[in-house]
Image (cartoon, rainbow, N blue to C red):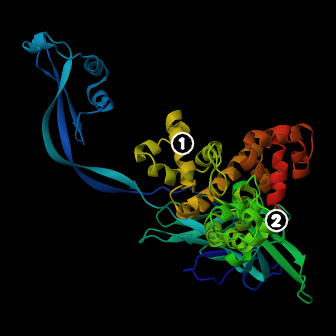
Amino acid sequence: MRPRLRAGWTAITLVIVLGLALAPATGTRRARALGDEPPGPDRAAGITVYYTAYEWLLISWAFNEVACHVVVDHEGLPTYGEVYYACGEDIYDRWVTTAACDDAESSNPQICRGYYLQLWDTFPAHREVAVALPPPVVWVTLDGCTSVDSTHLCGRNASLVLTAEEPLPNETIDRLEGTIDGEPFVCDPACLIDLFPTGAQGVPIEFWAYSSYGDSSLVYQAQVRMVEVVSEIPGEGLQWYVDVLSTQWRGTPLAGCSQVWEAFPPIGGPPGWLLTPETPAELATEIPYEYLASNLLLQGMADAGDCPNNGLLPGGQISPCGLEAALPAVTDWQNRFDELIFEVALDTGVPAQLLKNLFSRESQFWPGVFTGRPEVGLGQLTDNGADTTLLWNPSFYEQFCPLVLEAETCETGYPLLDEETQEMLRGALVRSVDAFCPDCPLSIDLQQADFSVAIFAETILANCEQTGMVLYNVYGLPPGEVASYEDLWRFTLVNYNAGPGCLGLAINETDRAGEPLDWEHVSAHLTPVCDGARDYVADITR
């Protein structure tokens, strides 16, 4: 079906609306054919930079003649590159191999060979520098929809809204152009484009904006899915679930990692273990964790004085009597991180319930560490886990690295750092989530434990990225085209728990056997050393 345009929107709002209605409307007109391909952003401004110039002379020892002038904009000796650029290859080669004059030669410098540098003058200078100006952008939102469980329940008049922004004060957006499922549209300056019901994979949309500056925004992509469902409420009739995948999305948070994998969540929203509830209170649990209970008893946070040996068995495990006595403290403690988990979920997109389930499995919410164990913190981070975080979550690396190393060193990027520096950075990340503190009350630094919640969310995001690449390397397609959203999360948990080697082997064996890429078949190919990940995934996805 060809999209149709509706007039009547103001030029100030400058939006494209993809309506869900299929019937023609008054005042519609067909989309015009697109013109040339958009040129993309191309804008810069010149600014004057004032600085102190340092003029150095490169002088020959033998003849005391000036071979060349080197002018730099910084204190200290010119760099090798600056001398090479100013003096040429021949003079540079002779200068760089010049040895220092010894004591005998210093009394008669004419017998010395080569060249030496001499600071000659300093003076104020200025130059013109080109600075890139911010380009126009286009954002995506929905109108007429209600966010429900990481998806959107929409009525008949709901719309997908594209909003263009021109950041330069004296310029305006001329028009928007694009295609929806291959059909072109152009808006000058506003239009309404009907959106037809789609299949499970949705339809692709490309869009961009032209500016009066003479350039355009980048070409952006989105994948939009609209599926009709019969409402469970009697008399409601048909409803539409709408999901959007785009880097330009500015609505309520999308389903976690869906954009990374280009994978739509299940129609109607993900299962409970992949949700972030409406409030932190909905994360509350009352699970009788034995490991947590024994630690609370040992630290005096629970009282089992009426039980033999204060509720503890000879080996340090908790007795049934001790567990019953400690239950109120266990319940309070396992929910003490709920607000933080909720806030971090909203900030990162990692499902809050998944994050809480992971902490439950890894540490039972006790962030202490025992000597000799390689895992630390609520999510039991290891050195290999830290490596994954720093390698596969570049935005986190850019924030974390300058807290440990010089900013100039960090600019190299984690993959290009030498092995010793990488090791130092991994160690710092592991220590940042290690809440064990022998001199603190309970032997735990609670502030450090709170801080670690966000670190573990960033680690999960890194595992999303790495999992997606493992699948792409085997199938050569976006992960969302070869596996379901739920199974992609299960694969990510394998990656987090057992590592990419275990996941990669199982994926390769599944592909080699010609089997569907789903959890049933992939888990069947986990090797014996990796097989513990099966129970790990089962615990977290309950």
| Residue identifier under label 1 | 414
Residue type highlighted by circle 2: Pro
Mark 1 crowdedness (10 Å alpha carbons): few <14, some 14-19, many ≥20: many
Left or right of 88? Residue 10 is right
x, y (%) of residue 506? 84, 41
Residue type highlighted by circle 1: Tyr
Between the C-alphas of marks 1 and 2, the distance is 49 Å
Q: Nearer the viewer, residue 138 or 359?
A: 359
| Residue identifier under label 2 | 320
Q: Is residue 246 visible?
A: no
Q: Is residue 22 above or below residue 361?
A: below
Left or right of 137? Residue 527 is right
Which residue is painted at 76% across and 54% down in the image?
Answer: 314
Q: Residue furthest bottom?
A: 235
Q: Is residue 244 above or below residue 102?
A: below
Left or right of 150? Residue 13 is left
x, y (%) of residue 147? 73, 77
Left or right of 124? Residue 350 is right
Q: Is residue 515 above or below residue 302?
A: above
Q: What kind of element bears circle 1?
A: helix
Which residue is painted at 68% across and 73% down in the image?
Answer: 332
From the image, which quarter does the C terminus lie in? Answer: bottom right
Q: Is residue 366 visible?
A: yes
x, y (%) of residue 423? 54, 39
x, y (%) of residue 372? 63, 42
Q: Nearer the viewer, residue 274 or 373?
A: 373
Q: Nearer the viewer, residue 179 or 101?
A: 101
The tag earlier along the polypeptide, 1 or 2, is 2
Quarter-of-image position of residue 363 = bottom right
- From the image, state whether disc 1 or disc 2 is nearer to you: 2
Q: Residue furthest left?
A: 107
